[in-house]
């Protein structure tokens, strides 16, 4: 057998993965940079200098309050990542645990978990998020929880479906024939075999969470002023679309690039993590 | 050592209750090999699963399965887990799928040792190298770190054998262990199993649809049809004198060197009975040339044609005259 090419060398030959990784790293770098440095303070208003076009001082111009758009975008990236990480984390941890439980126990436990998940699915994501923020009040924490709760049934379903497929495999029967209990089998046999599915799903859900946060902020239910957020920047730019179209373009492009990058990354990971594909070539 | 008495298993299927195994009884002693023959769906694998306590949860089971006097069917799940892989080992049909693709083989062989013997990771790994070496994996010390896809089918079956034998079980169940392998590898694997059974004095339940495999390896044979044992006895006797119409049909359907070129193999007319509404009488009645109306309604008696050679048929006296028309050329 020829030497198996390393993960890195295969990854570099996968264009979607490379582009996705670059975009995602850009997003992370922007958020990290904003922690230590921004061109200007994102909170500092300067009414006389409002709505400037991009120039040497304000690289991407200024908004209606004279704040520096480049600085707002950098700090806004932080909100997007925070929402993505926590919301996906909530869905991943709780949803995966429920899905694994459903697959391991079968019977009425599985039925119960899946029917409750169906109930969660019946509401469109944004609608349920609006409902939850309407109950608990608008704000980033509530937006994160709302998006996270929406992610739980998604992960529960994907986990259960993939785990059921693994439970039907002969090596699980072999493990049971070796005397392993169902918790033990879940941890050593089922979870490692569905990890790649979950990783891929997590990157895609991450992108969806960013979009959802932007949408909620756009509707005024997410991140609250003065905390910058790409979604709210979009909604504020809306009223000035004729005077300063670039104000809408920059956050729009940022959201698009982040979501596209994460989706490409997810697609790339799906190809690269498939053990069958890693043997070929 | 293993005593199965009147085992009956009914499974829930979407179409109703299917009797997969009916009134099956057999014993296996230490060091002995019992061959179980029959076509797909005759209840061979379900019997094996019942021995492991791995039947689907809603299966209805009656009878006894005693391992050294302990009734397996009465044990709670926790006690069963301690039995499986420890006192009962199992080898599966598909070595390609019986190993987890994401773990190194050494770890997989070591797992039962850690579970049942409470060995440390290092000790279990050292033991699994010894086991892999014993089952004929070359360079075992280096290969323990390899993943299943880096082995051939025959080697993988050797690894699953090492896994099943790790804790030195008293009873080994081999469910079609060589069906997925090519013929030369098949011979090597069977030789290995035979050696190990002799070496460790295990009891072996060898399940196969391949009469040749059974003839070469088993001391006693049990022929199953439609969930019932239709004929059982010493392998020598059964192979020398197949008596039940089904067994005869099975033997007649074997290809041999004498079969004319381009000639068709004899087949048994009809199809396997539906396990969901199995007729109350003989399961083979619908396909047997010697059938009389009684066969459909009455359970055939167990007739001993010679000591230990039992045939479940009520028409033994008449089979001879009917057989030629019962087998279609």
Image (spheres, grey):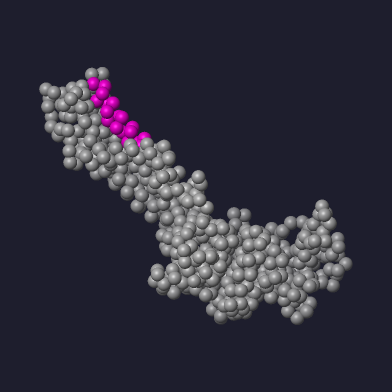
First to last magenta residue range: A244-262
Q: Please state, as top left, top right, bottom left or bottom right, where the N terminus of chain B lies in the image.
A: bottom right
Residue drawn at point x = 76 percent, y = 75 percent: B237
Residue drawn at point x = 19 percent, y = 41 percent: A35
Asked whether residue A257 is drawn in magenta, I would say yes
Q: As rendered, which of B182 and A221 lies closer to the eye? A: B182
Q: Is residue A123 left or right of residue A134?
A: right
Residue drawn at point x = 48 percent, y = 51 percent: A3
Vertical position of residue B123 compared to residue A29: above or below = below
Q: Is residue A19 left or right of residue A175?
A: left
Q: As rendered, which of B90 and B200 lies closer to the eye? A: B200
Q: Residue at the far top: name it.
A: A242
User: Residue B94: which quarter of the image?
Assistant: bottom right
Vertical position of residue B17 compared to residue B197: above or below = above
Q: Is residue A127 left or right of residue B308?
A: left
User: Residue A50: which quarter of the image?
Assistant: top left
Q: Where is residue A71 drawn, in percent x and y?
A: 19, 33
Q: Where is residue B139 drawn, in percent x and y?
A: 50, 65
Q: Tell me the chief SS of the magenta region.
A: helix
Asked whether residue A101 is drawn in magenta, I would say no
Q: Is residue A227 visible?
A: yes
Q: As rendered, which of B195 and B285 lies closer to the eye? A: B195
Residue drawn at point x = 52 percent, y = 75 percent: B168
Vertical position of residue B198 compared to residue A239: above or below = below
Q: Where is residue A186 drawn, in percent x and y?
A: 43, 59
Q: Please state, as top left, top right, bottom left or bottom right, where the C terminus of chain B lies in the image.
A: bottom right
Q: Residue at the far right: name it.
A: B321
Q: Is residue B233 visible?
A: no
Q: As rendered, which of B121 and A71 lies closer to the eye? A: B121
User: Residue B116: which quarter of the image?
Assistant: bottom left
């Amino acid at each position: 057998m020829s030497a198996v090419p390393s993960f890195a060398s295969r990854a570099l030959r996968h264009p979607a993965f490379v582009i996705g990784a670059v975009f995602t790293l850009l997003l992370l770098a922007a958020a990290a940079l904003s922690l230590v440095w921004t061109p200007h303070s994102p909170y500092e208003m300067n009414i006389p200098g409002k709505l400037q076009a991009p120039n040497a001082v304000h690289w991407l111009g200024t908004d209606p309050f004279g704040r520096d758009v480049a600085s707002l975008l950098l700090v806004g990236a932080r909100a997007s990542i925070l929402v993505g990480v926590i919301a996906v984390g909530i869905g991943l941890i709780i949803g995966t645990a429920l899905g694994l439980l459903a697959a391991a126990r079968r019977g009425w436990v599985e039925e119960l978990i899946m029917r409750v998940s169906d109930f969660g699915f019946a509401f469109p994501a944004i609608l349920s998020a609006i409902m939850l923020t309407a109950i608990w009040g608008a704000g980033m924490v509530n937006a994160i929880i709302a998006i996270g709760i929406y992610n739980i049934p998604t992960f529960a379903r994907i986990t259960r479906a993939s785990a059921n497929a693994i439970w039907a495999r002969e090596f699980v029967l072999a493990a049971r024939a070796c005397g392993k209990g169902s918790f033990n089998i879940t941890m050593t046999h089922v979870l490692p075999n569905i990890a790649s599915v979950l990783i891929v799903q997590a990157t895609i859900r991450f992108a969806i969470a960013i979009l959802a946060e932007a949408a909620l902020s756009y509707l005024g239910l997410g991140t609250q002023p003065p905390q910058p957020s790409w979604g709210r920047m979009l909604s504020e730019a809306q009223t000035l679309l004729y005077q300063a179209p670039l104000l809408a373009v920059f956050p729009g492009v940022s959201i698009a690039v982040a979501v596209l990058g994460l989706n490409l990354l997810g697609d790339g990971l799906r190809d690269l993590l498939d053990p069958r594909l890693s043997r070929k070539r | 050592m293993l005593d199965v008495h009147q085992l009956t298993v009914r499974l829930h299927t979407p179409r109703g209750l299917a009797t997969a195994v009916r009134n099956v009884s057999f014993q296996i002693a230490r060091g002995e090999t019992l061959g179980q023959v029959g076509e797909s769906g005759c209840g061979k694998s379900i019997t094996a699963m019942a021995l492991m306590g791995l039947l689907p949860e809603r299966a209805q089971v009656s009878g006894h399965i005693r391992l050294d006097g302990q009734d397996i069917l009465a044990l709670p799940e926790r006690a069963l887990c301690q039995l499986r892989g420890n006192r009962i080992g199992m080898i599966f049909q598909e070595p390609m799928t019986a190993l987890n693709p994401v773990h190194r083989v050494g770890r997989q062989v070591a797992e039962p040792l850690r579970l049942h013997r409470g060995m440390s990771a290092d000790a279990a790994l050292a033991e699994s190298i010894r086991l892999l070496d014993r089952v004929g994996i070359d360079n075992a010390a280096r290969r323990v770190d390899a993943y299943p896809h880096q082995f051939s089918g025959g080697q993988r079956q050797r690894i699953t054998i090492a896994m099943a034998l790790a804790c030195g079980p008293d009873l080994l169940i081999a469910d079609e262990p060589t069906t997925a392998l090519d013929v030369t590898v098949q011979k090597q694997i069977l030789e290995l199993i035979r050696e190990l059974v002799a070496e460790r004095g295990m009891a072996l339940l060898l399940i196969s649809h391949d009469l040749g495999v059974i003839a070469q390896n088993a001391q006693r044979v049990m022929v199953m049809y439609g969930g019932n044992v239709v004929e059982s006895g010493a392998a020598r006797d059964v192979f020398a004198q197949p008596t039940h119409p089904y067994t005869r049909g099975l033997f007649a359907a074997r290809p041999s060197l004498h079969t004319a070129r381009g000639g068709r193999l004899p087949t048994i007319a009809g199809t396997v009975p539906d396990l969901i509404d199995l007729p109350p009488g003989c399961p083979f009645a619908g396909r047997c040339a010697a059938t009389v109306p009684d066969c459909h309604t009455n359970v055939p008696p167990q007739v001993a044609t010679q000591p230990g050679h039992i045939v479940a048929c009520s028409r033994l006296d008449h089979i001879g005259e009917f057989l030629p028309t019962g087998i279609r050329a």
